[in-house]
Amino acid sequence: MRDSSKVGGATLRAIVTGLLLLILLVPAAFYVDLAWNKSSFFAGIPAMAPVVMLFILAALMSTPVFRTWGFTRNELLVIYSILLVGGPVVSHSIMGWMLVKSIAYYYMARANLIWQTAFLDQVPTWFAPTDMAAAEGFFEGRTAVPWSLWWTPLAAWGFFTVCLFVASLCVIALLQRQWVTNERLSFPLAQVPLELVREPSPRQGGAAGRLPVQWAFWIGVIASFGISFVNGLSQRVPSVPAIPLGPVAIMQWQRVGPLAGLGELTLYLPPWMIAIAYLIPKELSFSAWLFWLVDIGLTVAAIMAGAEPQRPEEWFDSTFPAPRYQGGGAVLALGIWVLWIGRRHLVRAARMAVLGRPRGADAEEPLSYRLALIGLTASFAGLVYFCWAAGCRPVVGFVLMALLVGYYMMWARLRAETGLGFLPFPLEIQNAVVVPFGTAVFRTRELVAMISTRWSFFPGFGASYEVVPGNALEAFKIADAAGINARRLTGALVVGFLLAFGVGLFFFLHGIYEYGFFGLKSGTTGWLGHQSINDGNRIVGPVTNPSKTDFNGLAAILAGAAVAVFLGLMRLRFWWWPFHPIGYMAAMCWGLHWYYMPFFIGWAGKALVIRYGGLRLYRQTVPLAIGLIVGDLLNGGAWSVIAIVSRGSI
């Protein structure tokens, strides 16, 4: 039976199925990503689970057994959306990082005595259990969870996380119509589920959704899955030859002289990355690799002028060329630009929220404008209250949370326009506020609050909370494209988020106290342990050696903002202008030293196809790119299943 237009796929059975799969995702994410560190993706199982589950369900619906009564295309997309938004909550990079962040202060202070005198007494006692036995059990394991000591910290961080979710969801709900309908952004990543599941043709009969039949799609799936699987097998069985896709160093880093600015030239050709570069606007992919070359040239010039030799990707300080600070300025400028472009829509939405007229004009929105505005105001006030309770002055809490929600808005916008969900923001929030004011103006408790919430704004790679609002925006785009009831879908997303958060807290704490954080592979061999347990050093430095205004960094931020505005204005004035401001920003991010070649190949391939085959040939080859992305994700899912079956031994 097909969906009625009233629910548009957001049926009870689809929502319940999505929620059940979300619950099953919790133990899989804990064991594969956190305990065994066997994930093929930086962001872990939650990053690949939506596409993998959508593929499996669509394959089942394609069989005669489910042809008549199986899930329709829209129902499958609803299930996908629930996993897309709720899944990241139970990733090691969000929930795992949030849990270990504050309790690590007390455990690690035993080996870092300066922490005890510098800031430990300024950490709010409700951030984490202060009892040393609870901290030792957390890191060493083989003990029961001291729930009585955790209830207050869990309630506090739960309040912060829910407010963060509501605030970001309301911002996205207010802006999504501007981006989906008025500006018609490309949403490259949303194309994957929309192309992966098709309505059955009259000849096929039935109502259930189907996998696509285009030969180009299946060539992409088979090629990407085969290459990735062979390379994964080669890592586990060295006798199996790998297919050389990298990353492979084609020129070693020269440690002295101007050539040090070239860094280590690396060749990396992941099929999924080339496919994303093929799907995004070619001006963007062109600008990304071109401005990366410009950044290398500036780095060489800086070393020639007397700067200490460094690799361009590791140039994190504010001395010229200060790429991270340039990129941070570009982000701030583009955020203001986005709001300015959408000002008419926002004014109209605010007027409708206050006056309530015309009645029913926002009926197709994920939330009514009035509810979205009330939710944003209340949740943002909750975030500022959290900061105030943690010891921040109200103005500091307001600025920090405004930057945080603004970052989420900008990240979602970038995801919608470019699909660049894998690149980090160039400048973290604490750096953005420290550069113009220095650290001397901040209280110790304010520095503690900034670093303790760093898990929520660590920039990019889908490795922090920033992925949640971006995924919510993609879910709204999917609903708009497929005709799914946005209000019912939003309700399902909220329930899924709360369910994943509650079940995840319970399961993760049990698992961590059983294994001990240092018994988890992700805590000892992955990036999580280093980032989470040593962040006290980020507090000690500013406390013991306070700084003043960083004029070099401020100049670089202003320069980056000016370049981004100039590139944007030129794109508006001249249709032929080939340089994209987001490409400039992307080139200032860490990661382009790996992705410059995929960007070049994707740009060159798209440019040649459109030049010699036109848009018709390009549309015919889009399924090939989608297949490359799906095949790589299926490979990650296959190795995750193998890890579960082998209990982490493979």
Image: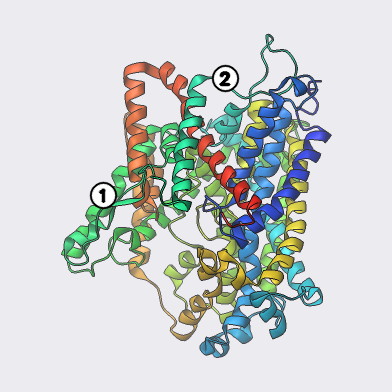
Q: Is residue 492 above or below residue 311?
A: above
Give the numbered dot on residue 213: 2
Secondary structure under tag 2 reads loop
Q: State the CA–CA distance, disc 2 to disc 1.
A: 43 Å
Give the numbered dot on residue 238: none
* Position of the N terminus by quadrant: top right
Q: Is residue 630 above or below residue 621?
A: below
Pick the front one: 406 or 8: 8
Q: Is residue 476 above or below residue 44?
A: above
Nearer the observer: mark 2 or 1; the answer is 2
Pick the front one: 435 or 648: 648
Residue 342 lies left or right of residue 154; in this view the side is left
| Residue 209: percent from left, percent from top | 69, 24
* Residue 402 visible in the picture: no
Q: Which residue is label 1 attached to?
A: 294
**Residue type highlighted by circle 2:** Val
The residue that appears at 77% across and 33% down in the rendered structure is 10
The residue that appears at 59% across and 47% down in the rendered structure is 47
| Residue 557: percent from left, percent from top | 38, 59
**Residue type highlighted by circle 1:** Val
Residue sticking out furthest to the front = 239
